[in-house]
Image (tube, grey):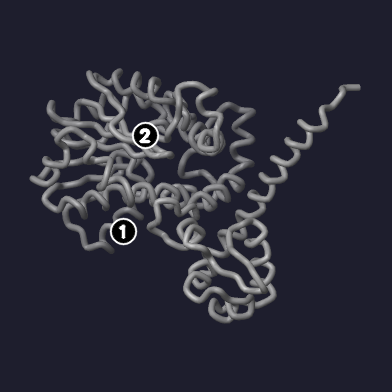
Amino acid sequence: MTQLDETILNELVGRVLGDLGGAVSVPLVRIGDALGLYKTLKEIGPANADELADAAGCAPRYVREWLAAQAASGYVRHEGGRFWLTPEQSFVFAEPDSPVNLIGAFDTAAAMAENQPKVQLAFKTGRGVAWGDQAGCMFCAVARLFRPGYVNALVQEWLPALDGVVDKLKAGATVADVGCGHGLSTILMAQAFPKSRFTGYDFHPASIAAATAHARAHGLTNLRFEVGKAQDFEGRDFDLITCFDCLHDMGDPEAAAAHIRKALKDTGTWMVVEPMAGDTLEDNINPVGRLYYSASTMICVPTSLAQETGLALGAQAGEKRLAKVIRSGGFAHVRRAAQTPLNMVLEAT
């Protein structure tokens, strides 16, 4: 019989129990967000369960148990029967524009769990799971996951890190946002640079419909959205083309790179925002890598394998692999212009 090291075993069990605590918190966090419990607690706390239930219009017995679970998870503070959110907890759970609001990550985790049967079958067949066929509103969850990063960094840090791009945008440039999803990135740029013209492209019609509705709600007139694939979208002579967290999801990113190069002016720039990753597995054995490898298994690789070519770069492709793909399209220069804990920003010219 194999001799077990009790210390190593106990450490592993402890890690797994911590993981299970996080996993079973997913529906509770989503309930707290959907019913406004975090928002209400931020506004009225410290409060007891009955007070929070009354303010949020919920049943006290459920709220009491929910609060106990949140306190045990360290998501709310508790003392003497009263509960409140610290400023740090509010930043994560109750402030939509916070750079570390993580509600979208819980939504994505729920969609990944719901998607298990389709991906599990794909493990046996080797086929993909198309973006529009994944369980739940995967594209809604992913849009919400990336929103805090875009809101807090795109206009403020990422675009200024590119050589001469902001000056062009202020003067009036033509921009294509390829793989735009629900259009958040496109809308943020269009709001910041009213003299420029923006076109968002995505191969998923439902996402383009949602993006168009969002643009209409914001009253913007300098952008439009069209259904189009990265390797054959219409339009030429762009000053700037952007791809946000989508190049690794494409079936044929090399064909996309070649088409984007042809669609750019000779003086144009391609900005590629991708998940932060090192170039080796060893570089990515960390909390961020763990999150992205899991998401890649359940979302990114199946999405790519469902498309033609199916290169399946994965969410942790790393800068060297991404740069090779970008250069294959005819780009001479690729550099890392900016980064955050979750993203790297590559500039290609």
Residue drawn at (33%, 50%) of the image: 152
Q: Position of residue 106 (x, y in %)?
A: 54, 52
Return the x and y of residue 45 as percentages of the image width and height.
53, 74
- Decide which of tag 2 and tag 1 comes sooner along the chain: 1
Q: Is residue 4 left or right of residue 203?
A: right
Closest to the observer, 136 or 69: 69
For label 1, the crowd category at 10 Å Cα-Cα, with few meaning under 14, some 14 to 19 and many 20 or more, is some
- Discs 2/1, front: 2
Q: Amino acid at mark 1?
A: His
Amino acid marked by disc 2: Met
Q: Which mark is residue 344?
A: 2
Where residue 216 sits: x, y (%)? 26, 61
Q: Is residue 91 left or right of residue 59?
A: left
Disc 2, SS: strand
The residue under the point 23% across, 49% down is: 189
Identify the residue shown where x is 60% and y is 48%. 114
Which residue is denoted by mark 1 in the rendering? 214
Q: Quadrant of residue 340?
A: top left
Q: Quadrant of the C terminus?
A: top left
Residue at the image point whose x is 54% and y is 39% from the top: 291
Judge whether 70 appears above or below 228 on screen: below
